[in-house]
Amino acid sequence: MQSILKYLLAASFLVVSFASHAQQEVDMADTMRSNGKIYVVVGVILIIVVGLFIYLFSLDKKVSRLEKGPTEKIRQTKS
Amino acid sequence: MKTWLKIVAVVLVVYVHVAGLLLGVPRLNILNETIRNLYFHVPMWFGMTALYSISLYHSVRYLRNPTLDRDHKASAFATTGIVFGFLGLGTGMLWAKFAWGAFWTGDPKLNGAAITTLVYLAYFVLRGSVDNQEQRSRLSAVYNIFAYAAMIPLIFILPRLSSSLHPGSGGNPGFNTYDLDSQMRLVFYPAVIGWFLVGYWISTLRIRILALEEKMAELDYAKHS
């Protein structure tokens, strides 16, 4: 009985180790990360994201300028 | 919106675009690197839901005490919300092509999201079809409540009741089950907060422009009378 249990245990360990081995062979962009210039992609994305945010800030400023701009002055002279 | 909140939004979103691409993720078959889409696709839907919720809040406030400002807020948040919704649909379709093999499947989650977007499109059709401002504001505020009440079951309840391919619904586990050491949360939560803040920011810009347009219309009216 004990020997059967031992074999079962050994077999299960084997299965687990195979399973974890198979896990490690999943295709991931490892080479791309090390020397595949992934940082270039990150850089490109950053340029776009930061550029869009600068644009958003400038739009924000433009609206602020309009809010205290000529319409407000006309209103003050009218009243 | 306070300037520091805008800066927080920028910092979070920039962080997400760096960490989302470079930090480690669980290794899974089929998904492979596309698991990183979780950082970009899902926050669109979270953002959309949050923006629609704020829109609903302002619509209810409008009906309790009608002021033009509340109508502007309701419409601006719904507009940004639907933009997020379209981005969610687009990113989801691209992801589906490579994870499930087709841009679109008859999945309850996908159809629910599409119907929700159509329901909110109808909100803007309604707004565009009524000339009288008070009528437009009141009708669209009431419709907005119905639209929200349709969205919740379509996106969050029905897909969970039926079988669905989409993670997090219909007996399909969400990504939290794969993310055993919670490393994905470090990017996912900042992404949700960051994108929501960006959506909020864009909405406030729209509200301010609507107020300016109103002011100009008033001046025009004063000039001609």
Image (spheres, grey):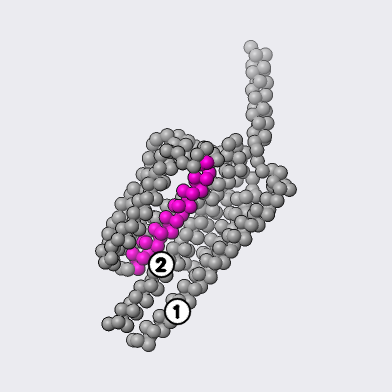
Of B2 and B91, the residue lying toward us: B91
Q: Is residue B165 above or below residue A5?
A: below
Q: Secondary structure at mark 2?
A: helix
Label 2 crowd (10 A; few <14 / some 14-19 / many >=20): many
* Left-right relation of B59 to A48: left
Magenta span dominant secondary structure? helix
Label 1 crowd (10 A; few <14 / some 14-19 / many >=20): few
Query: Tag 1, which chain?
Result: A
Query: What residue is shown at x 50% (from left), y 70% (from top)?
Result: A60
Question: Percent x, y for residue A37?
Answer: 70, 51
Magenta-highlighted residues? B69-97
- The quadrant where residue B222 appears: bottom left
Question: Percent x, y for residue A74?
Answer: 39, 84
Question: Is B127 part of what is drawn in magenta?
Answer: no
Residue located beneath label 2 in the image: B207
Query: What residue is shown at x 60% (from left), y 37% (from top)?
Result: B28
Q: Secondary structure at mark 1?
A: loop
Extreme residue in the top direction: A1
Question: Is residue A12 at least partly visible in the picture?
Answer: yes
Are both tags, 1 and 2, on one chain?
Answer: no
Question: Percent x, y for residue B62?
Answer: 30, 63
Q: Is residue A57 above or below residue B96?
A: below
Query: What residue is shown at x 36% (from left), y 61% (from top)?
Result: B74
Question: Is residue B60 at least partly visible in the picture?
Answer: no
Query: What residue is shown at x 39% (from left), y 50% (from top)?
Result: B117
Of A66 and B27, the residue lying toward us: A66
- Three-letter residue code for mark 2: Ile
Task: Name the image quarter holding the C terminus of chain A.
Answer: bottom left
- Pointer 1 with pointer 2, Cβ within 8 A: no
Question: Is B73 part of what is drawn in magenta?
Answer: yes
- The quadrant where residue B211 appears: bottom left
Residue located beneath label 1 in the image: A68
